[in-house]
Image (cartoon, grey):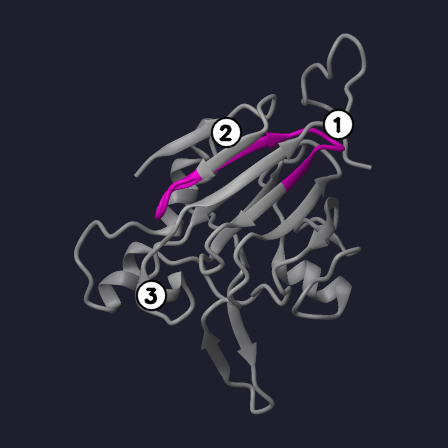
Amino acid sequence: MTSAINDPARDNFVIPPKEGSSFRLDKGDSIRIVNDNGTQVVDFWCISLTGEAEYLSMEHCREVLGKIYYEPGDVLISNRYTPLLEYVADTAGGQHDTLIAACSAQMYVRFGREDGHPSCASNFLQNTRHIDWPLHLLPQPWNLFMRAAVRESGAIEYSRPPYIPGGIVELKALCPVLVVMSACPDDCYPTNGGDGSAKAVSVSIHASAKPVGGMGSVSGVACP
């Protein structure tokens, strides 16, 4: 399992199957997550670099937006109601799951898998060590490309991602953030991989124009 902290001065990255990466974005930077094979789920987190233990919160977004599926044009907020991301564009079919927890070592034990099975939870913790993230705090991820529809009865219906190779989700940072992503290794639920195997995903970052002299330290910089 690899932890890769990528320099956003570069443009293009690949997250290998079952692994995770983290990306620092400044205000105005845009990130595109590309489902190259059209079958891979990506667990997505966003952490504010200006607030203590402040993160993209699915429950707060659902409350404020009044829906369980977000759409381009929506502003996604933190557990303190701070705007963190603008949902810019989506060519991957939308309806990305906001309800289901990240897969974890304990989940795989429950399914009878081997010890040490890769998980999105462990990828998240590995990719947040450098910011001293609290080990007990695992936010609900935004499960990009994952389908977990809610039926009229209230039951959850798990299904594979819509097969849209090259489908893109594009987001813009509204303040300095750390984005963490995991190419989900789930081989238990019918939500990932098409044939049950994890695939790589591509990421591209467009850095906004910075003032001469740079942005300086993020400490003390407040989100709008």
Of helix, strand and loop, which one carries label 2? helix
Q: In the rendered structure, which segment of residues is drawn in magenta?
A: 15-31
Kindly report the distance in space between the C-alpha atoms of the residues bearing marks 1 and 2.
Answer: 23 Å
Residue at 38% from the left image edge and 72% from the top image edge? 190
> Secondary structure under badge 1?
loop
- Expressed as whole percent of the image width and height from the top left, the position of residue 171 reads 68, 45
> On screen, 36 above or below 70?
above
Circle 2 packing at 10 Å, graded few (<14), some (14-19), many (20+), is few
Residue 9, visible in the rendered structure: yes
Mark 1 vs 3, N-terminal side:
3
Q: Secondary structure at mark 3?
A: helix
Task: For the residues labelled 3 and 2, say whether their Cβ atoms are less than 8 Å apart.
Answer: no
- Residue drawn at x 43%, y 43% is 124
What amino acid is found at the position of numbered circle 2 in the picture?
Answer: Ile
Taking the image as shown, residue 139 lies to the left or right of residue 122, namely right
Q: Which residue is mark 2?
A: 131
| Res. 195 mark | 3
Residue, disc 1: 208
* Residue farthest bottom in this picture: 153
Residue 74: say if magenta: no
User: The N terminus is located in which quarter?
Assistant: top left
Q: Nearer the viewer, mark 1 or mark 3?
A: 3
Left or right of 91, for residue 200 = left
**Which residue is found at the position 73% from the left and 13% from the top?**
214
